[in-house]
Amino acid sequence: MSPSELTQREPAPWSCRTRSSLIASLVALLASNFACTGRISAPGSSAQPTPGGGGTGSGTSNGQAGSGATGVGSSTGSEPVARLEKLTASQFANSVRDLLGQGAPLGPVEPDNVVDGFATVGASTLSASASGVGQYEAATGAATAYAFADATHAAAVLSCVPTSTSDTACMTQALNGIGRRAFRRPLSSDETGRFLTLATTIGNRTGSSVLVGMRHAVWAMLQSPSFLYRVELGVPSAPDGGRLKYTSFEMASRLASALWNSVPDDPLLDAAASDALQTPEGVTEQAQRMLAMPAAKQAIVAFADDLYGMAHFGEATKDPTIFPKWTATLQVAMQQELEQRVVDVVLGQRADYLSLYDSRATFVNSELAAYYGLPPVTGAGFQPAQFPASSPRVGLLGAGAILAGFALPQRTSPTQRGKFIAEKLLCYNIPPPPPGVPPLPNTAGSNATLRQTLVAHRSAPQCSSCHAIMDPLGFGLEYFDSAAQYRTTDNGQPVDATGAVGGVAFDGLAQMATALRQQAVAGPCLVSKVYENALGRTLLAADGASLDSLAKSFTGSGNRVDQLLERLVASEAFRFVQPNTP
């Protein structure tokens, strides 16, 4: 079913309604301030999910003050505008290590601003604070000290290692080489001159050396706004009617960010220098090369971590008296399991992404295998594993990181789990709770299950409409406790894990996973998430046609994300600042 056909579906029988069609009019809704206090859809509109909706992080997406100068997400349906993108924390770390070596130590930097669930979207709303500047200085200082500890280390970083400050030809070559990657474009002659002067001046000091001078020059590069920000503004393209089009070097920067979560390599910059990145064919050629390289894993992991809420999973705590098997190492293993499953289906198998929803294949280490009740693994680290057909643990929603991450220290939370499913897998917009929400009542009785308590909670008018969306989805995971272990009772009573999604009834995770995979909105929802993350902004009305086309090709490819990424980066939406509007 195509996105346009989805607009003809019957409204969902829920009282918290968006008024968007699935893709075609997805954008005006993203800026709306929904209030789940009753039916709010426009007359005659259908209550469909909103692709890209469900902002769960900090920041704003309504185009008002505080959302930066981008104008993204405004209810006017404005066109995209060019902006500067501050490197996310993971982009910064990947970039420094790709430039200076994987062993380069890195300290903490300023936390990301998460908008609509993605750090890349919030990146255009931030500037470095005074304390943040100090953190960048310290982090890059430690990394450059490692990279220039001796000539052997420096040879892994520089194209030429000078032996003295009089070797200006080698110094210039080396600074231009690493500077081109760091700035994602060639250095200007003035920039080269300044860095060369800095390296020479410091290198000539008593007790110093040329390597110390080169270290300080590269250290200065990595504190420059030209490194810390991706400068992608576009230029008017006469053959395209004057539309703003990203230059080849800007495209190299965008491709490296979207496909590697890092800086470009030399072949990508060489392609930019020859203007090969100005055509869809040239972009596709580079995208295919880049997705075949190990660095592509970095971008997929960052996307999965943001989409599935792993940025805060490390903060999840469990009551040790209730869950004595919960450990810090188990928590780390759960996140790695989730990441490996996503990377495997996207870059390993290059298979149907939606198979992750009901697949029984996973990756476990010895601790996680024992926790899941799987046979012991052989060998060190993570190994492929398979849950038996009789296992109640199925798909991504059966992963420990999801079950434990969206639960409370002492009990489960069908509301949190259901909100996650609704927003991230089905693209419904769930607004924050209104003021004055009462606490969970005890009127259900001391021996009530959590489900019974939540049913009583939904009797409050200000709670009923949103909980009617979230809770029925979250109930499907109730066979798993707060620490992601299987159970059959809740407060001494049998677990009731029945519910419905899109009008399809289920009992337990396995049936719900199948129903989720078969939802017509599942594919377009994922497409919108990949699109939003890659473009680094919230969705606009101008994106409708591009999303519709990508959603159709995604279905035609068998739901392969690697092919979706190839088509996305070659599309006009990715190559132009301004869309081709009638």
Image (spheres, helix red, strand yellow):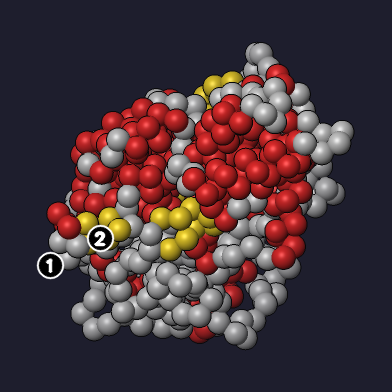
Query: Which residue does the numbered mark 2 point to in the structure image?
Result: 236
Label drawn at residue 547: none
Measure the C-alpha gap from mark 1 to mark 2: 17 Å
Camera-side residue: 461 or 211?
211
Residue 157 image position (x, y, % from top left): 62, 28
Q: Quadrant of residue 458?
A: bottom right
Q: Residues within 10 Å of mark 2 (few under 14, many from 20)?
A: some
> Quick one: which residue is furthest to the right in this view?
207
> Quick one: which residue is furthest to the front in this view?
166
Residue 150 image position (x, y, % from top left): 76, 24
* Mark 1 or mark 2: whose residue is earlier in sequence: 2
- At 59% from the left and 23% from the top, the residue drawn is 160
**Residue 137 vertical position relative to residue 154 in the rendered view, above or below:** below
Is residue 309 visible from the viewing direction of this image? no
**Residue 8 vertical position relative to residue 287 in the rendered view, above or below:** below
**Residue 466 vertical position relative to residue 166 in the rendered view, above or below:** below
Number of dots carrying numbers: 2
Residue 23 image position (x, y, % from top left): 26, 61
Query: Which residue does the numbered mark 1 point to in the structure image?
Result: 582
- At 60% from the left and 85% from the top, the residue drawn is 435
Identify the secondary structure beneath mark 2: strand
What kind of residue is marked 1? Pro
Identify the secondary structure beneath mark 1: loop
> Quick one: which residue is furthest to the top in this view?
378
Camera-side residue: 200 or 582?
200
What kind of residue is marked 2? Pro
